Image: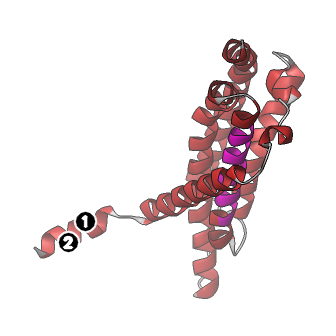
Amino acid sequence: MDKLGIGVAKRIGKYDVYIGVIGLSLLLGCVAGVVTASFVEDIGRYFSPADELLSGFSFVSVLNRFLSLYKFHFMAAFLGFTLFGVFLLPVFAVLRGFFISFSVAAVCGAYSFWPAVALFGLSAIYSLPSFLIMSVVSMEMAGRLFSATTKKKPLEGIVSRNFLLTLLITTIVLLLGSLFDCWLTPKLFEFAVG
């Protein structure tokens, strides 16, 4: 019986805890966004399809789309360098979830379900998992900084190869996703509305 308990405890690592905390924070934010949107009358007036989402395929539209998504990843990475990033990253994940779900609810209020899927579904497929991964790696880095500071131990190096690799991969994924998103989203939206 003891072996079973030790094996389970070994499998539950710090990344599992960080994934759970960030994932639950995103979910809590999503629920709060939908609940808040349900109390807003005429929610469709808060949304007009953004030019960057429906402007078509151009360098400027891809760059705008990339930057609008990357700001959340950049902020998560930045919070990984702060002493209180361990506590602020879950709050930031709640805000990210809130903004996404409130936006989707606004589109549903202005149009219907399928245009909301056309506008946000494709970007959610690549941006939310990469945000989750970036937040988890940043939270681990902030946790090491916080632990070293509170225990007054020297910190060997705050930036790990894992963090740099995650930053590179999420940047590439967001750039490629933005290219594909700017090409396909206007077509999907026209199909969903028409």
Q: Residue furthest front?
A: 41
Residues in magenta? 91-106
Asked where in the image residue 42 lies, by quadrant, the reply is: top right
Residue type pointed to by label 2: Gly
- Quadrant where the N terminus sits is bottom left
The residue located at (71%, 20%) in the rendering is: 185
Q: Percent position (x, y) of residue 14?
A: 44, 66
Rendered residue at 58%/60% (across/down): 25
Residue appearing at x 14%, y 71% in the figure: 3
Label 1 to label 2, Cα distance in Å? 5 Å
Front-lying residue, 49 or 15: 49
Using a 10 Å C-alpha cutoff, classify the residue at mark 2 as few (fewer than 14 neighbours), some (14 to 19) or many (20 or more): few
Q: Residue at x 47, y 60 (%)?
A: 20
> What secondary structure is marked by label 2?
helix
The reply to whether callout 1 and callout 2 are in contact (CB within 8 Å) is yes
Q: Position of residue 69 (x, y in %)?
A: 75, 40
Q: Dominant secondary structure of the magenta stretch?
A: helix
Q: In which quarter of the image is residue 176?
A: top right
64 relative to 42, above or below = above
The circle on residue 8 is 1
Task: Tell me if mark 1 has few (under 14), some (14-19) or many (20+) residues whose alpha carbon lies within 10 angstroms of its own.
Answer: few
Q: Is residue 41 left or right of residue 76?
A: right
The picture places residue 128, in percent across and down from the top left corner, at 60, 42
Is disc 1 placed on a helix, strand or loop? Answer: helix
Which residue position is annotated with label 2? 5
Kindly identify the amino acid type of the residue bearing the numbered disc 1.
Answer: Val
